[in-house]
């Protein structure tokens, strides 16, 4: 799949500027009950988007992509609701979208379970539901039309594939690998797939997973849980962070303890690996080798979702499940390729100029 241009930082800034100019990217705010004076062209396709929160740089980039895509200029009226990390708020948002009579509902679900009732209501109202990012587990698969997102288990396999090669190259024996799994929000697909990837590799290679804790995908919780884990288990020499924001918190906790995040495990450093590759701060830590490797998680789904809606508008059926293509990043040039499942994947070696270029030009090279 051809990946489109990404300008994570710039897209977020653009959205912030627009929201300052027009008083918010969210048409819903100007359509409060009783306002009654909002004139909306009949031609616009009405889309309700229930975003689960704003917990990470990945999430903010994802929201920016949806907002940018579903603009009035592109023929859409977007109702954007941020659930503040609470799935109950998502159900309420979906019910409001149904009441408004939107044409489509997009949902980025917090966790996999608990969707049967509210999505049945959307189905009864004959509103197609498009899922993005995390997946859901429902008894009736017709409760949603299609899903676009990442293969989280594959992401886990890629990062552990990198770790395996790294340990081999540095002659680090399995018995000397002591991992702390800093997990994402429990029950979210991104957590489930990445944790499964680690557990599988740990079992296969004989690594010791010392402990695991829910860091809720946030920097603050990631920091808190790492402080605790390092205190309770001084032997930890690898931290597997299930997103970059938690990695930022973990690096801070390691340094506060007077230890070094880095690649020299034998010399007492703590190896940090992570997921996303969106946050500039995390990419900077990668270049500084304080984060050893990042499994890419692609957030800019706007155009993929728009394609699904265009197909539905044309009376066609989009694929039920579409995975976005993703790579893997490291600043260490010794590992240039890793194996995951039955495939080999090139490792993108990130340098300062690579990052500067991405930030300045808004581009990421297609895979
Ligand atoms: O990796 C993390 C976010 O579900 C893919 O959620 C998403 C994850 C992403 O908060 O940063």
Image (cartoon, rainbow, N blue to C red):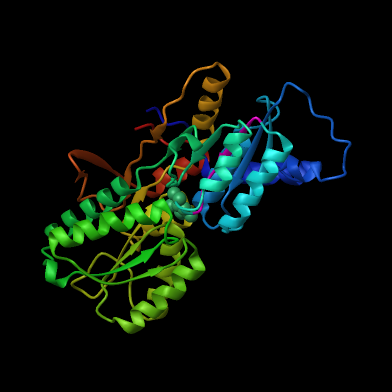
Q: Quadrant of residue 287?
A: bottom left
Looking at the image, the residue that sits furthest to the top is 314
Q: Nearer the viewer, residue 106 or 236?
A: 106
Specify whether 7 is left or right of 176: right
Q: Is residue 362 left or right of residue 75?
A: left
**Rendering coords of residue 27 (x, y %):** 74, 40
Residue depicted at 47% across the width and 57% down the height: 281
Count of numbered marks: 0
Residue 271's quadrant in the figure? bottom left
| x, y percent for residue 288 | 36, 60
Please say if 233 is above or below 45.
Answer: below
Q: Is residue 196 above or below residue 100?
A: below
Q: Position of residue 97 (x, y in %)?
A: 68, 40
Which residue is at the front of the view, 263 or 181? 181
Please give the range of residues in magenta: 103-110
When the figure is inspected, residue 3 is found, relative to residue 218, above or below; the finding is above
Quadrant of the frame with the N terminus: top left
Q: Is residue 214 above or below residue 150?
A: below
Picture coordinates of residue 30, whole percent (x, y): 80, 42
In the rendered image, is residue 362 in sight?
no
| Residue 22 or residue 84, whichever sits in front | 84
**Looking at the image, which residue is at 73% across and 21% down?**
43
Is residue 94 in view?
Answer: yes
> Which residue shows up at 49% across the image and 40% down it?
132
- Which quarter of the figure is the C terminus placed in? top left
Please state if 32 lies on the left or on the right of 90 as rendered.
Answer: right
Q: Residue at x 35, y 48 (%)?
A: 152
Membership of 320 in magenta stretch: no
């Amino acid at each position: 799949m051809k990946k489109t241009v990404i300008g994570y930082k710039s897209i977020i800034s653009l959205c912030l500027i627009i929201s300052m100019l027009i008083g918010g990217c969210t048409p819903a705010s100007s359509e409060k009950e009783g306002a009654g004076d909002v004139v909306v062209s009949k031609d616009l396709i009405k889309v309700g988007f229930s975003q689960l929160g704003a917990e990470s740089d990945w999430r903010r980039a994802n929201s920016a992509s949806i907002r940018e895509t579903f603009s009035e200029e592109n023929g859409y009226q977007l109702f954007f609701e941020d659930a503040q990390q609470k799935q109950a708020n998502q159900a309420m948002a979906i019910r409001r979208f149904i009441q408004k009579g939107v044409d489509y509902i997009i949902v980025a679900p917090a966790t996999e379970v608990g969707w049967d009732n509210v999505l049945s209501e959307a189905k009864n109202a004959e509103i197609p539901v498009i899922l993005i990012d995390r997946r859901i587990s429902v008894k009736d698969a017709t409760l949603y039309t299609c899903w676009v997102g990442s293969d989280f288990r594959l992401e886990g396999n890629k990062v552990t594939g990198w770790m395996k090669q790294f340990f081999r190259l540095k002659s680090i024996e399995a018995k000397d690998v002591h991992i702390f799994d800093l997990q994402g929000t429990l029950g979210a697909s991104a957590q489930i797939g990445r944790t499964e990837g680690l557990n599988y590799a740990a079992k296969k290679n004989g690594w010791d997973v010392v402990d695991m804790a829910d860091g809720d995908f946030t920097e603050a919780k990631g920091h808190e849980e790492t402080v605790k884990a390092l205190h309770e288990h001084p032997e930890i020499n690898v931290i597997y962070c299930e997103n970059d924001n938690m990695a930022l918190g973990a690096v801070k906790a390691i340094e506060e303890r007077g230890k070094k995040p880095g690649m020299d495990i034998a010399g007492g450093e703590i190896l940090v690996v992570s997921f996303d590759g969106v946050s500039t701060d995390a990419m900077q830590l990668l270049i500084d080798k304080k984060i050893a490797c990042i499994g890419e998680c692609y957030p800019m789904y706007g155009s993929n979702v728009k394609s699904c809606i265009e197909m539905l508008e044309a009376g066609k059926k989009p694929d039920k499940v579409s995975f976005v293509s993703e790579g893997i990043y490291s600043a260490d040039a010794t590992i240039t390729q890793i194996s995951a499942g039955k495939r080999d994947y090139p490792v993108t070696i990130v340098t300062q100029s690579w990052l500067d270029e991405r930030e300045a030009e808004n581009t990421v090279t297609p895979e």
